[in-house]
Structures are given as C-alpha cells and as structure tokens.
Amino acid sequence: MTTKILIPTDFHVESLNTLKLAMNHLETYEVDVVLMYSEDLGNSITELLFYNPKKVVESLRTKEFDEALSILKNRFETRIKSISYEIFHGYRIKLIEDFMESKNIDSIFLPKSYLLRLPKKGFDTIPLIKKSKLTYKELDWETGVYDSEELQLNALFIY
C-alpha cells in the first residue's frame, strides 16, 4: 500500500532533512512524496493571467536542491515511488484542510526547529497546519550546523 506524505519546503537543501527523517520514521514501504511550497498570488490581473505553477517551481529549484533530492531518491529508491511539487495559495485554515483532502495526503511531516527561509512572495503554512484539525508529526534535527548548501548536501549522506 502506498502512503502519500506532505512536506513543506523552501527549496533549500536543509529543508529536505524533513524528508530524510520522515522516510526513516515511516513503516510503509511505498511512499508518494508531495513537497509543498506556499506563495501569495497577489492581485495583479496580469500576474494571474500569466501565472504558471511549473515556472514558479523551476525558478525556485537550485542545482544543489535537485542534487540533494536525487541523493534522497537514490537512498530510498525502493521506497520513494514518486516526488511531486504542489503550490498552495491561501491564508485560511479551512483552505489548507481542503487542500490536504483534495491531494489525498495521508501524513504531514513538519520541521520542528528549522524555520523556512522563503522568498518575498512565499509564506509559511506551518502555523496554519498546526492550528488546523490536521494530524501532523514534527521532526527535529540540529539546524544551522552547515554554512553552505554544499555542506548540507553532504550531510544528507549521514544516517
């Protein structure tokens, strides 16, 4: 049976520690991973007309982030069935609950002490999730230990 998990991301390598720890905690064999990024849509008609979620994700992904994700895919290659990106827009608890239901999310994993470092349009949905009636698990690791994305990338090899 496949479990679908959701993990908020800011497209920094360190945020993928949540995925690594979630995979170590999960007892199910096959996992579909949803990496969620939250962004304010704004009110501009022009921006809304030309809005493309795929382009947003592409603009935020870095070479280091993709490499880190590749490392995790290889590390858990027999367990990770798929990895997808979803963008959430909304500031209400009911919207996040409906979003999770519409995506058929089984489990939500949140970083406990890591604070998402979001770009200007991005916003943190973790407080919304915590205030909702959704069930989630917080995972913790020592944050800020590695100065660069490259060192954080290497840290993903450590069990």
Image (cartoon, rainbow, N blue to C red):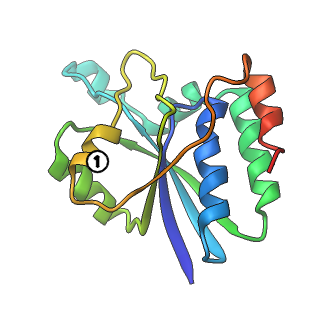
Instruction: Give whichever of 107, 137 is nearer the camera.
Output: 137
Q: Report whether 125 appears left or right of 77.
A: left
Q: Dot 1: few (<14), some (14–19), or many (≥20) neighbours within 10 Å?
A: some
Instruction: Give whichever of 101, 116 is nearer the camera.
Output: 116
Q: Residue at x 66, y 32 (%)?
A: 13
Residue 148, x across and y down, in percent: 74, 18
Residue receiving disc 1: 130
Residue 71, x across and y down, in percent: 80, 47
Q: Report whether 57 appears left or right of 97.
A: right
Q: Report whether 33 appears left or right of 145.
A: left
Task: Name above or below for residue 37 compared with residue 19.
Answer: above
Look at the image and tell me in which quarter the N terminus lies: bottom right
- Count of number-bearing discs: 1
Q: Residue 62: which quarter of the image?
A: top right
Q: Residue furthest bottom?
A: 1
Q: Residue at x 38, y 25 (%)?
A: 122
Residue 109, x across and y down, in percent: 47, 54
Answer yes or no: is residue 82 visible.
no
Answer yes or no: is residue 51 visible.
yes
Give SS at disc 1: helix
Q: Report whether 132 appears left or right of 25.
A: left
Q: Disc 1 marks which amino acid?
A: Lys
Task: Name above or below for residue 35 compared with residue 28.
Answer: above
Instruction: Give whichever of 157, 104 is nearer the camera.
Output: 157
Q: Residue at x 21, y 59 (%)?
A: 133
Task: Name above or below for residue 30 compared with residue 86.
Answer: below
